[in-house]
Image: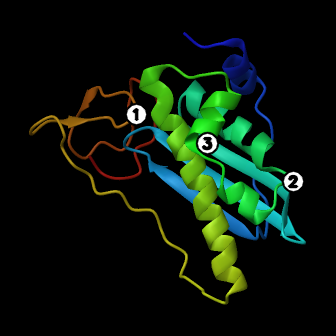
Amino acid sequence: MYNQTVMDHFRNPRNVGVIENADGVGEVGNPLCGDIMTIYLKVEDGRIQDIKFQTFGCGSAIAVSSMLTEIAIGKTIEEARAITNKDVAEALEGLPKNKLHCSNLGADALHLALKDYEDRLAGVSRPETKRKENHEHSHGDKCYCPYCDVEITEGAIFCDVCQSSLEEEH
């Protein structure tokens, strides 16, 4: 299912972490779907000097984030903007078809971080967004844990099955 390159980047991810006072930050994904990627950039003289990521998701999402950072580090802004989801998937020597969307998330997060960097350079400031996902019942009238999909009671704040804290009421 997963090749050696994907497994290596999953088991030994490169560039994990947060860059304090990052020059650009891009985040994509949805916690209700399961994959969230945040890319942090530090840029010097028009090149990506440092890049870090935080990813919550499957092994493919983590491998994509790790490989993406390896591809992007040292690139100019223009070179980094040209990185596509196909480039990431090829560098990983392929992903299972049902996991190709993860490579889209990686490229999208990078492009958002680049846009954030350019906006900051141009003096465009945006208020920091506070994540708020609306709770929806996607399985009819019953409520399910967004992490393990087990039925839970309305108003639960903790899932006994997967041991997840449910910040929003369910």
Residue under label 1, please give it: 147
Residue under label 2, please give it: 74
- Look at the image and tell me whether residue 45 can be seen: yes
Q: Secondary structure at mark 1?
A: loop
Question: Is the residue marked by circle 1 packed among few (<14), some (14-19), or many (20+) residues within 10 Å?
Answer: some
Q: Is 158 situated left or right of 113 in this image? A: left
Residue under label 3, please give it: 55
Question: Is the residue marked by circle 3 packed among few (<14), some (14-19), or many (20+) residues within 10 Å?
Answer: many
Q: CA distance from mark 2 to mark 1?
A: 36 Å
Judging depth in this view, the residue of 66 and 130 nearest the camera is 66
Q: Position of residue 170 (x, y in %)?
A: 26, 46
* Quarter of the figure with residue 16: top right
Residue at (64, 63) in percent of width and height = 113
Q: CA distance from mark 1 to mark 3?
A: 15 Å
Judging depth in this view, the residue of 68 and 76 nearest the camera is 76
Residue at (57, 27) in percent of width and height = 60
